[in-house]
Image (cartoon, rainbow, N blue to C red):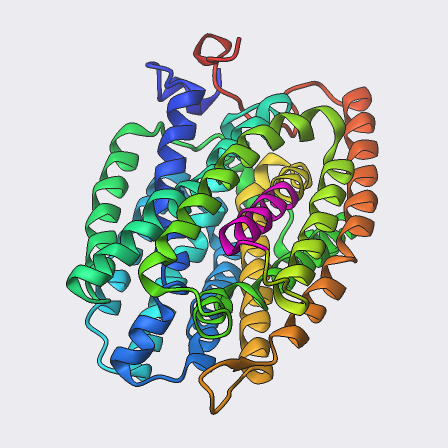
Amino acid sequence: MSAESASSPAAVSERAVVLLIGAVQFVNILDFVMVMPLGPDFAKGLGIESSHIGTIGGSYTAAASVAGLVGGYMLDRFDRRKALAVCMLGLVAATAAGGLATGLSTLLLARVCAGLFGGPATALSLSIIADLIPAERRGRALGAVMASFSVASVLGVPMALKVAEVGGWRLPFFAVAALGLVVATAALILLPPVRGHLGQGGSAARAPGVGALLGRSDVQLSYLMTALVMMSGFIVIPNISAYLQQNLGYPRDRLWIIYFAGGIVSFVTLRMTGPLVDRFGSFRVGTVGVLLAAAFTFVGFVSYPAWLPIPLLFMGFMMAMGVRNVAYNTLTSRVPDNPVRARFMSLQSATQHMASALGAFLSSRLLVDLPDGTLGGMGTIAWVSIGLSLGVPVMLWVVENRVRSREQARALAAPPSQGLAVPLSPQANPHA
């Protein structure tokens, strides 16, 4: 019996683990994604130019990247549950501080602090899922956890926009901080200890170091794929709200509608894509997502037809991003072995956030506030996004083939328990 299961005889179900981690990710993601739709609101309230919204978004992701690099050396040494609780409490405090900002500098400082805790929280959440859910059901579980992004869009972002209309742009920050405190407490109390990666005699301490991990070609390719996915998305995403309002004339009081509609589509897409990835593989499903995302990016930001309803366009964009992201995340979860999973995930989180920051900072450099109040340069950043995303299918194909070959060789050469994740007991599996 593993140390993990021995310390948790009550055997929490896979469904409960997915729900708890999904709640953690909901708060973590909402803390990040609500800032961009609220951008025009706090930009007006604090006297910040709209073209600088990407800088504010990038400050979070840059800090999260640095935290991920540091976490790559440390996270595998601790119980993942306790480490996750510490990160979530730090995120709560930083989010509340964001609501107290008085200008660009104080808001940037608060977002940097949020990123320092939010980045490792994401890596730990995905590591817990990968440790506790067997590989054959991991795509479904990751799809469910990633649906927290959709729930944040369906419920969180529209509610944040409505709350900001009633109580000002500061109130959503305080509300998310309060919710985060409740979720962090629940996760600490209800999640089982996650110490299987430590093993008897400290297997994590004997695991390959960061240098050895980064020396693996499949890890390098996985991180390159991560950078392409995130940079192609976040050169556009931070500026969507300002673009819709200032360039396309979409009303502020109806902005919540498109996030609500897009979130519903994304939620359904993520729930359907997980099983499809398990069945058809990440390359096939991910390539479809990349091509769809490129098409909707072109239509939305390069050659927008006036007859196309903006909510419909946004729904298509969210669907495409969801398909691509489930395929990519499921594949990268298969790259590391259990003893270095949190280390790998933390470095991947650092790569994700640094690429996102580069995309956001680049968009701030390419965009300009024109005299008529519109954003200039959206077509340019759309083409850059499409160009970057077209490299993703190649990476998906290469990484998936390498991972499949390694898994087949390991299955023939090693006992099933060696180097694999420690799943929950079959009796706790709701899908059985």
- Residue 21, compared with residue 387, is above or below; it is above
Residue 313 lies in the magenta stretch: yes
Q: Is residue 424 left or right of residue 323?
A: left
- The residue furthest front is 307
Q: Is residue 413 left or right of residue 114?
A: right
Dividing the picture into quarters, in which one does residue 361 lie? bottom right
What percent of the width, then of the height, locates residue 292?
70, 48
- Residue 177, compared with residue 414, is above or below; it is below
What percent of the width, then of the height, locates residue 378?
60, 74
- The residue furthest left is 167
What percent of the width, then of the height, locates residue 157?
35, 52
Residue 414 visible within the image? yes
Q: Which residues are magenta?
A: 308-325
What percent of the width, then of the height, locates residue 314?
53, 52
By secondary structure, the bulk of the magenta-drawn segment is best described as helix
Which residue is pictured at 53% across the width and 25% down the height? 133
Which residue is pictured at 83% across the width and 51% down the height? 394
Q: Nearer the viewer, residue 173 or 197?
A: 173
Q: Nearer the viewer, residue 194 or 296?
A: 296
Residue 163 lies in the magenta stretch: no
Q: Nearer the viewer, residue 40 or 347?
A: 40
Q: Is residue 329 left or right of residue 255?
A: right
